[in-house]
Amino acid sequence: MEKRDVGKIDSPELSPREYPALEHIWKLLKDTEMPELDGKLADMPFVSDIHREVKALRELAEGLRNEINQRNSSVEALQEREFRFRYMASHDSLTGAMNRSSFLSRAGRELKSAMSQGILCGIIMMDIDFFKKFNDTWGHQAGDEALRHVVSAVSRVLRKNDFMGRYGGEEFAFFFNRADLNTGLAIAERAREILINNPVNLENGPVTITASFGVAMADLAAAPDEGRYVNVLIRRADIALYQAKSAGRNRVVCYSAAEDAAEVSDPAEGN
């Protein structure tokens, strides 16, 4: 009988598709009982060869399994880094809300989809009241904490499919769908109330924050152009927002064509 070198088996190159099969083989080998050879069995070359070969296969399978685990760990780490990169590219680093470009892109897609199916949807614009005065009084670090607090608080009252983004400075935008005007106003009102009932905790104590809101519904008869019409809706919600500011702040106002025709001036005291 030709003697084979069974104590050494080269490690083959495996593709990820072969990993489950290797895992199965490894378990079979691991669970196989391998008694110690003694007496006459140890003197039988064929039996001894089989014993060494199974042992070598076990070592090979274990080595390949460890290699697969290392590769999987590397892939998972790479996927985690990719996820973090994508998140950082699409979200505001201070508040964790979607950034402006990411919000506009998603809102445009959602708006086009909803309008093409005749689904009611709209935009809410929110602006923190007297935020410049807040920064001047408490400092910019407190202002940063206030922005984070606002996003955290308001996020708790949004529905599952609603989403928000930081539009700029202390102004935020929300998209909602499968909702009529009354539902849109209710969403904004819940956001307004949670800010009043949950002051931001600063080093000097709790400070109440208020915000003003403008709500605009999509016109389902309009052409659902995702790039342009979302800007139309944001402009309309902004008009309603400035109406809320002019009326005394800390309130929710819905857009109307009459307000669009009227000249809307910025409220005093900046914001």
Image: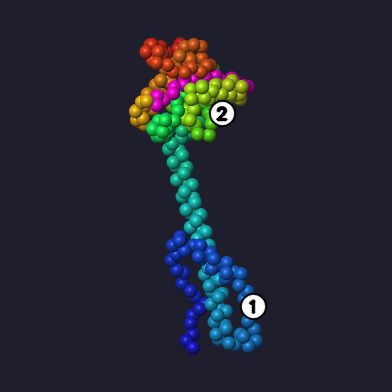
Q: Residue at x 50, y 34 (%)?
A: 161
Tell me the element at label 1.
Answer: loop
Q: Secondary structure at mark 2?
A: loop
Q: Nearer the viewer, mark 1 or mark 2?
A: 2
Residue depicted at 57% across the width and 30% down the height: 156
Residue 216: within the magenta? yes
Residue stretch in magenta: 203-220
Type of amino acid under label 2:
Val
Q: Nearer the viewer, residue 134 or 151?
A: 151
Residue at the image position 47 percent from the left and 53 percent from the top: 75
Circle 2 packing at 10 Å, graded few (<14), some (14-19), many (20+), is some
Q: Is residue 22 visible?
A: yes
Instruction: Say left or right for 7 vs 39.
Output: left
Q: Is residue 62 visible?
A: no
Note whether 238 is above or below 77 in the view shown: above
Q: Which amino acid, by three-letter code, is at mark 1?
A: Pro
The image shows residue 110 at horizontal and vertical percentages of 42, 33
Residue 109, position in %: x, y? Answer: 40, 34
Disc ID at residue 157: 2
